[in-house]
Amino acid sequence: MAVLTAHQHRIRPSNLLLRGSIVGLTLATAAIHFSLGGTLFLFNAIGYAALAVAMVLPGPFARGRWLVRFALIGFTSATIVGWLAFGARFDLAYLDKALEAALIGLLLIESWLVDGGPVAVARRAGQMAVTALR
């Protein structure tokens, strides 16, 4: 049961709520990183903001949203791992990591509902790789 597939053009309210939550969490963590100052945090904030925009681009960009979801999962995971290895331990950092963990969870849920889960996504990525190699 998919909420929205690449072949459907209607958007259900549950999908809007889920996507809105994802974009909201992404922008919130972008704002937190931006507020910390420094080049690394600035680039991290820009990355989050760009991925938030990519999550809502309409038209032909929507067909590649499955790839944006997994880029955002990877980016967020890398941010968490970087913080675990090198980050300062203060209250805002823990709040941000909670937001990022929730973000990953919502992205996985949306991926399952919209894309059919990891097997379907792996097939799509494999087809894309085969097409690129031709």
Image (cartoon, helix red, strand yellow):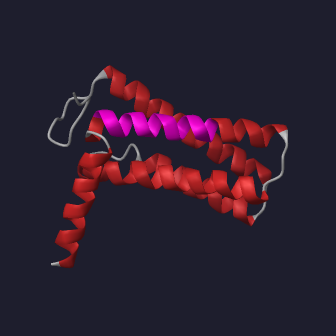
Q: Is residue 96 left or right of residue 105?
A: right
Q: How many marks?
A: 0
Residue 7 screen position, x and y as percent:
14, 40
Residue furthest out toward the top: 13
Q: State left or right for residue 24 relative to residue 39.
A: left
Residue 92: % across, % down? 79, 39
Q: Is residue 122 magenta?
A: no
Relative to 42, 107 lies left or right: left
Q: Which stretch appears magenta?
A: 99-113
Nearest the viewer among 34 and 95 is 95
Residue drawn where x is 21% and y is 38% of the image: 5
Residue farthest toward the bottom in the current orientation of the protein:
134
Q: Residue at x 75, y 39 (%)?
A: 94
Q: Residue at x 19, y 70 (%)?
A: 130
Q: Position of residue 103 (x, y in %)?
A: 54, 38
Q: Is 30 situated left or right of 15 in this image?
A: right
- Determine the main secondary structure of the stretch shown in magenta: helix
- Residue 89: % across, % down: 84, 46
Quadrant containing the N terminus is top left
Question: Along the line of sight, which residue is nearer the eye, 53 or 66?
Answer: 66
Q: Is residue 16 above or below residue 119?
A: above
Q: Quadrant of residue 39?
A: bottom right
Q: Please, is residue 13 above or below residue 125 in the view?
A: above
Quarter that holds the C terminus: bottom left
Q: Is residue 109 magenta?
A: yes
Q: Is residue 119 above or below residue 107?
A: below
Write the residue at 35% across / 22% down: 14
